[in-house]
Image: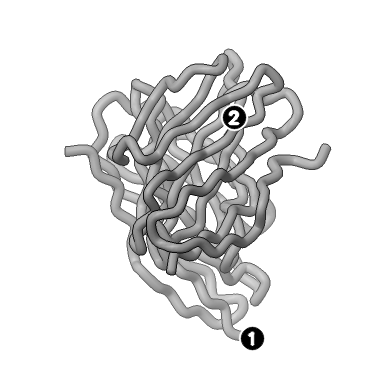
Amino acid sequence: EDQVTQSPEALRLQEGESSSLNCSYTVSGLRGLFWYRQDPGKGPEFLFTLYSAGEEKEKERLKATLTKKESFLHITAPKPEDSATYLCAVEKSNYQLIWGAGTKLIIKP
Amino acid sequence: DAGVTQSPTHLIKTRGQQVTLRCSPKSGHDTVSWYQQALGQGPQFIFQYYEEEERQRGNFPDRFSGHQFPNYSSELNVNALLLGDSALYLCASSFRTGEGYEQYFGPGTRLTVT
């Protein structure tokens, strides 16, 4: 069964304390993996698309990496404004997206 | 570019009623997908429209139907509303090129069924 699992469910960090969020997947026919940021009551904001194992992408304090079974979202020296829920989604060969439940990140000043 | 827009932002309906939600895609995007998101959960795929036809459908009953217009805008209709239909409904537009794929979300419509 196709599945996307994100861990941890919630993560509390001090400002400046770097860490990583995990997205593991078991999906047939992976076309791509997406990372989104979502603030409460708002639509997800697109961050990255990764297509092949070994690929990396960066945006400000965020860096996403992809292996054959999982993806990591690394957050370097986070700030309180990085607090949000981070969602991972995997696109199957039939173009359908399978979503994880998200990791709620809280950065304390 | 206004990005993806949705209307209305909030809606309160009574069980058994029908509702129509609207979405305008980002400029240049030809594909629209609809999602249902319950509190604390990831989005659940409802269906996707491309060239005015439903291309993919998730595990949702026939009470959920949609339409895409020639200008790529889209509507989501839900009939015979149930209390469990209360959720944030998200529209996403996307465009695929040989180099990659991007999907952008609208702000969502918060539907409350009482």
Residue found 61% across the figure and 60% down from its top: A42
Estimate the x, y position of residue A65 in percent, counting from the top left: 46, 44
Residue A82 is tagged as none
Estimate the x, y position of residue B21 in percent, counting from the top left: 58, 45
Q: Are marks 2 and 1 in contact (CB under 8 Å)?
A: no
Secondary structure state at the residue bearing disc 2 = strand
Estimate the x, y position of residue A38 in percent, counting from the top left: 56, 59
Residue found 74% across the figure and 40% down from its top: B3
Instruction: Answer whether residue A103 is visible to the viewer in this image.
Output: no
Which residue in the structure is indicated by mark 2? B94
Residue found 66% across the figure and 29% down from its top: B73
Q: Quadrant of residue B69?
A: top right
Q: Quadrant of residue A62?
A: bottom right
Judge left or right: residue A13 versus residue A70.
Answer: right
Report the residue that reaches farthest toward the left: A1
**B55 vs A15: above or below:** above
